[in-house]
Amino acid sequence: MTPEARGAYKKLTRILQAKSYANEQMRDSASFTRMSADQQRSVEAMYWAVMDPIASTKENEFRTEYYARVAYADLLWSSDDFDNSRCR
Protein backbone atom coordinates (compact mmCIF):
# COMPACT_ATOMS: atom_id res chain seq x y z
CA MET A 1 0.00 0.00 0.00
CA THR A 2 1.32 3.42 -0.87
CA PRO A 3 1.94 5.97 1.89
CA GLU A 4 -0.83 8.16 0.44
CA ALA A 5 -3.35 5.30 0.56
CA ARG A 6 -2.24 4.37 4.06
CA GLY A 7 -2.69 7.98 5.15
CA ALA A 8 -6.37 7.90 4.22
CA TYR A 9 -6.93 5.07 6.70
CA LYS A 10 -4.98 6.76 9.47
CA LYS A 11 -6.92 10.04 9.52
CA LEU A 12 -8.30 10.72 12.96
CA THR A 13 -11.16 12.66 11.36
CA ARG A 14 -12.69 9.27 10.44
CA ILE A 15 -13.27 8.65 14.14
CA LEU A 16 -14.08 12.10 15.49
CA GLN A 17 -17.60 13.47 15.46
CA ALA A 18 -18.47 15.68 12.53
CA LYS A 19 -19.65 18.51 14.79
CA SER A 20 -19.46 19.10 18.51
CA TYR A 21 -22.34 20.69 20.37
CA ALA A 22 -20.39 21.04 23.60
CA ASN A 23 -18.00 23.87 24.37
CA GLU A 24 -15.14 21.46 24.96
CA GLN A 25 -11.93 21.91 23.03
CA MET A 26 -11.14 19.40 20.24
CA ARG A 27 -14.18 17.17 20.21
CA ASP A 28 -14.99 17.29 16.52
CA SER A 29 -13.33 16.81 13.15
CA ALA A 30 -13.90 20.42 12.07
CA SER A 31 -11.84 21.86 14.92
CA PHE A 32 -9.20 19.16 14.37
CA THR A 33 -8.72 20.12 10.71
CA ARG A 34 -8.21 23.78 11.67
CA MET A 35 -5.25 22.87 13.89
CA SER A 36 -1.64 23.11 12.77
CA ALA A 37 0.14 19.91 11.71
CA ASP A 38 2.08 19.83 14.99
CA GLN A 39 -1.11 20.20 17.02
CA GLN A 40 -2.79 17.45 14.98
CA ARG A 41 0.11 15.05 15.62
CA SER A 42 -0.03 15.84 19.33
CA VAL A 43 -3.79 15.28 19.51
CA GLU A 44 -3.50 12.02 17.55
CA ALA A 45 -0.81 10.71 19.88
CA MET A 46 -2.90 11.67 22.92
CA TYR A 47 -6.06 10.13 21.43
CA TRP A 48 -4.44 6.76 20.72
CA ALA A 49 -2.73 6.76 24.13
CA VAL A 50 -6.02 7.38 25.93
CA MET A 51 -7.84 4.75 23.84
CA ASP A 52 -5.22 2.05 24.52
CA PRO A 53 -7.08 -0.54 26.65
CA ILE A 54 -3.91 -2.15 28.02
CA ALA A 55 -1.29 0.55 28.43
CA SER A 56 1.30 -1.90 29.73
CA THR A 57 1.63 -3.62 26.34
CA LYS A 58 3.62 -2.31 23.41
CA GLU A 59 0.71 -2.73 20.98
CA ASN A 60 -2.39 -0.51 21.00
CA GLU A 61 -5.15 -3.11 20.67
CA PHE A 62 -7.85 -0.51 19.99
CA ARG A 63 -5.91 1.00 17.09
CA THR A 64 -5.18 -2.45 15.65
CA GLU A 65 -8.88 -3.33 15.80
CA TYR A 66 -9.80 0.00 14.18
CA TYR A 67 -7.39 -0.57 11.27
CA ALA A 68 -8.66 -4.13 10.83
CA ARG A 69 -12.27 -2.94 10.63
CA VAL A 70 -11.45 -0.18 8.17
CA ALA A 71 -9.50 -2.62 5.96
CA TYR A 72 -12.35 -5.13 6.08
CA ALA A 73 -14.94 -2.50 5.14
CA ASP A 74 -12.74 -1.32 2.28
CA LEU A 75 -12.38 -4.87 0.98
CA LEU A 76 -16.07 -5.60 1.41
CA TRP A 77 -17.21 -2.59 -0.59
CA SER A 78 -14.45 -2.37 -3.19
CA SER A 79 -13.75 -5.98 -4.14
CA ASP A 80 -15.86 -7.97 -6.60
CA ASP A 81 -14.78 -11.15 -4.80
CA PHE A 82 -17.08 -10.34 -1.88
CA ASP A 83 -20.82 -10.78 -2.28
CA ASN A 84 -21.91 -7.44 -0.89
CA SER A 85 -25.34 -7.59 -2.57
CA ARG A 86 -26.78 -8.82 0.74
CA CYS A 87 -25.63 -5.56 2.37
CA ARG A 88 -27.56 -3.27 0.06
Image (cartoon, helix red, strand yellow):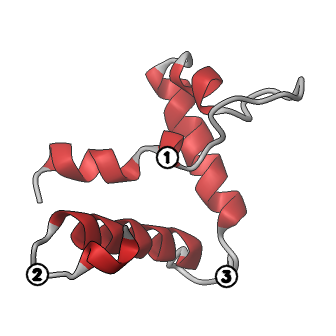
Point out the frontmost of discs 3 and 1.
1
21 sits left or right of 85 in the view: right
Q: Can you tell which quarter of the image residue 31 is in?
A: top right
Disc 1 residue type?
Arg
Compute the Cα span from label 3 to label 1. Answer: 26 Å
Residue 12 vertical position relative to residue 57 in the rendered view, above or below: above
> What count of labels does the image hold?
3
Task: Give the residue number, with chain letter if any, for mark 3.
Answer: 56
Task: Give neighbour class at mark 2: few <14, some 14-19, many 20+ (Cα, 10 Å).
Answer: few
Task: Give the residue number, with chain letter if any, for mark 1.
Answer: 14
Q: Residue at x 34, y 53 (%)?
A: 9
| Residue 3, position as x, y percentages in the image | 16, 48
Quadrant containing the C terminus is bottom left
Task: Give the residue number, with chain letter if any, for mark 2.
Answer: 81
| Residue 59, position as x, y percentages in the image | 50, 78
Q: Can you tell which quarter of the image residue 71 is in?
A: bottom left
Q: Residue at x 11, y 81 (%)?
A: 81
Q: Earlier in the sequence, mark 3 or mark 1?
A: 1
Quadrant containing the N terminus is bottom left
Residue 6 vertical position relative to residue 30 in the rendered view, above or below: below
Labels 1 & 2 near each other (Cβ < 8 A)? no
Residue 78 vertical position relative to residue 20 in the rendered view, above or below: below
Residue 56 vertical position relative to residue 25 in the rendered view, above or below: below
